[in-house]
Image (tube, rainbow, N blue to C red):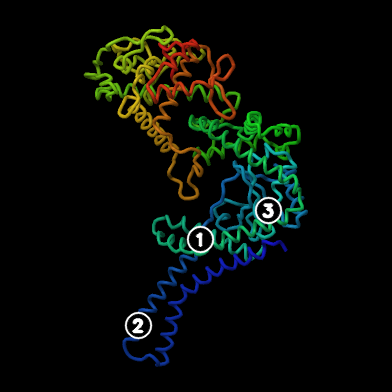
Amino acid sequence: MEAGVPSARSRALAVLRVRSRALAVALLPAALAVVLVAARATGRLAGEPWGTVTLVVCAVAALVLLLAGIFAAVVLRASPAVTPTVPLSEAAAPDLYRLVRDLADRMDVPPPSAIALTPDCDSWLEDRTHAAHRRRGIAGGPQSAPGAAPVLVIGSPFLWWMRVAELRAVLAPVVAGTGPSAHPDIADARGFVRGLDAAVDVGSRRGLGWIAAPARLLLRLCRTDAAEMERGVAAAASDRAQGVDYGLRIVAQEQVGLAYAGWDRLLTRVALPAWRMGRWPAHLDAGVVSALTELSRRDRLAEGFTSRLGERPACDLLEQPGVIDEATSLLAARLFHGGPAEAGPDWSPVEWAAYPEEVVDRKWRAEAARLHAALDALAGPAGLPAGPSGPTGATGTAGAPASAAGSASPAGAGAGTATPAASVAPAASVAPAAGASASPGPSGPSGAAGSATIAAPDAAHPAGDGFAGPTLERVLGCLTGAAGEGALGEALAGRLSADLAREERAAGTAGGAGKARGADAVPLFPLQPPRSGRDLLADHVTAMVCCAAVDSAGAAPGMDWLDGPVLLVGGDRRADLAPRVLCLVEDGDPEPLRDWLSALGVRTEKPVRLV
């Protein structure tokens, strides 16, 4: 017997003792009522006030029994949380099932009842034998039969990045956990804890709010013992797996850490921008191989890892890797972003080859349109906030903008910059509001004024704006000297934050967000905290610069496997834009950015094409 099994069993018995004590407390009023009734019947407690006391105790006992019965029924019938996964039938992965069964035979443990994939860098066993899972259709087949072995959940990035031998070494201690899991006391204790956890979720429903308090109390009482029980189970599984590919497992654990780093970068830098645009990359698992290969090339600590790519990948154990990859990619978008469960017109897949054009270019132009819409809003009748050296501009009425004190000059001409008053006046062409019709101009590296610009309905041509559409010069002029508290940059950042929050709220309402409850709510694991207003402003200015470079300097949108959207000039990535944008946004100094634009040949006075 493994060293951890006795410890795990003793902790499981401690958890079950908590259940027994809770049952004893619930039965105590009933026992007292029986004693009083028996004493009254035999004449030992004759007279008053024993008659009244007996009636009160009997009423309390009946109420406690009723509440205890309801609580026990909820704990027994409530559906424990089940990790959203992609089920993998034996027909879809016969070689993988054969590998897992061979592992179980070598370690003399029951094989898992089924295999499922999750878009995460982890693997574990999950019990899906609860009756509520069968009632709700969450689980079916052998895996849901009473007493069945748990389901083996494998992180899908492991299948694409790891080699077959590495995957077998990593899965060995996980599969070995089916042995201790089959012990009746451990299985009973786990079921009790899962039932309490599910009861806490049920307590959020109307009319059952009182359920959550006793469930939380019982969870606190058995929390330490349950955690130690799981540690004992893990120790027992690790001890049993010592003789299976132990040396290779040490090397494979390094691949687990590398896979986690690459997967995180791929999701946050590459997939997240696409999800925000209503597109989901259809082959995230295949992309993680490219991301990890690039990470290995950049990180000297990962040297030599790419030589493994000549060996057989674990995804060869699947019959149709592309279909499984697409399913796990859609699930990743739902878990980490809250996207719909199925593809649709507003939630369509995108291939990696089309990512620069369909995601990067659209993202830049959407952000540029939002930036100019925010500038138009700040240039409305309410006037503009004061900058560091006084008011930045004013307008009388909506139809009569104030005239500019000077004219804006393109960056490449070497002339002075536009005054804030001239820059913040409403442009002649801006992004249309939701529902407004517009005719987008032809796409391509060279956008021109006219059909290449989306014109806002009834847009007036202010006297102070010398440009025929949304231009980069306008943005540079607005943010020049506009740093500091209460300045235009701060107001613009706040406006962008409000506009973006409004758009996300509208998208969530349209998609039915907020209807899910508890463990069914998505996203379960949001990737990034809310961005600050300054970060949003820097992102939008960067997008505007990239749009201008694409339209007037022959640049192109691109994608980096670790950094996401990038600007390509002559086929090479330009990574020196970010510090110059930050200098403009944070310090109000446009000169570094103007020098960069001039060297690249970007015409800041030329209107950009918006979406």
Judge the density around disc 2: few (<14), some (14-19), many (≥20) Cα neighbours within 10 Å: few
Q: Position of residue 352 (x, y in %)?
A: 60, 27
Res 53 label: 2
Is 14 displayed left or right of 398 in the figure?
A: right
Judge the density around disc 1: few (<14), some (14-19), many (≥20) Cα neighbours within 10 Å: many
Q: Mark 2 belongs to which amino acid?
A: Val
Residue for badge 1: 196
Image quarter where the N terminus lies is: bottom right
Residue for badge 3: 113
Q: Mark 1 belongs to which amino acid?
A: Leu
* Whether label 1 touches label 2, CB < 8 Å: no
Tell me the residue at 46%/69% (across/down).
Answer: 68
Q: How far apart in space, not on screen, are marks 1 and 3 (Cα)?
A: 25 Å
Tell me the residue at 34%/13% (across/down).
Answer: 418
Judge the density around disc 3: few (<14), some (14-19), many (≥20) Cα neighbours within 10 Å: many
Q: Earlier in the sequence, mark 1 or mark 3?
A: 3
Q: Earlier in the sequence, mark 1 or mark 2?
A: 2
